[in-house]
Image (cartoon, helix red, strand yellow):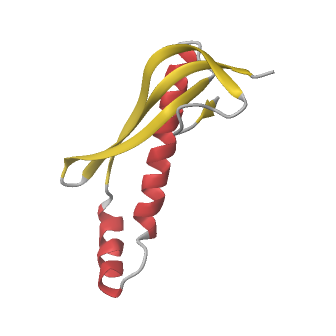
């Protein structure tokens, strides 16, 4: 499955569109990680616990979007976008969406 934030894929042409596909996950912070993050916040630097959690969340959302596109018969997803929103004080939703398409290699 090819995915891209662009409207097209160089060397390929879109032959059909199957519509919007999306994947999401909602993740809550862990109290132990909050304590570590709070300490890091005092001394500065990257909060690696949250960086890792967000990266895993994005990958899970992408996997869910790809699974939806495959059930529609698509072999690519174009125009993908990410968005994040808070669900509650300690939980956030990661949403990825795009257009499921069928592409063919240009000759």
**Residue 58: image x %, image y %?**
46, 45
Residue 3 or 60: which is nearer the viewer?
Answer: 3
Q: Quadrant of the N terminus?
A: top right
Q: Residue furthest front?
A: 107
Tell me what residue is drawn at x 26 percent, y 46 percent: 85
Instruction: Name the image quarter holding residue 61.
Output: top left
Judge whether 107 appears above or below 72 on screen: below
Q: Quadrant of the C terminus?
A: top right
**Residue 46: image x %, image y %?**
43, 74
Q: Residue furthest right?
A: 107
Judge whether 62 appears above or below 45 on screen: above
Instruction: Name the image quarter holding residue 83.
Output: top left
Tell me what residue is drawn at x 48 percent, y 25 percent: 99
Tell me what residue is drawn at x 29 percent, y 48 percent: 92
Instruction: Please state if 98 lies on the left or on the right of 106 as rendered.
Output: left
Judge whether 43 appears above or below 10 on screen: below
Q: Residue furthest left?
A: 89
Judge whether 15 appears above or below 39 on screen: above
**Residue 74: image x %, image y %?**
59, 17
**Residue 27: image x %, image y %?**
34, 47
Instruction: Please state if 52 lies on the left or on the right of 38 as rendered.
Output: right
Residue 93 or 74: which is nearer the viewer?
Answer: 74
Instruction: Please state if 26 lies on the left or on the right of 53 as rendered.
Output: left
Q: Residue furthest bottom?
A: 43
Residue 57 or 35: which is nearer the viewer?
Answer: 57
């Amino acid at each position: 499955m090819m995915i891209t934030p662009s409207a097209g894929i160089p060397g390929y042409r879109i032959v059909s569109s199957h519509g919007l596909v999306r994947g999401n996950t909602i993740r809550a912070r862990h109290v132990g990680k909050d304590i570590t993050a709070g300490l890091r916040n005092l001394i500065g630097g990257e909060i690696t616990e949250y960086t890792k959690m967000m990266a895993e969340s994005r990958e899970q959302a992408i996997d869910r979007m790809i699974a939806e596109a495959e059930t529609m018969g698509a072999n690519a997803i174009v125009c993908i976008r990410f968005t994040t929103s808070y669900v509650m004080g300690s939980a956030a939703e990661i949403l990825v969406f795009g257009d499921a398409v069928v592409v063919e290699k240009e000759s």
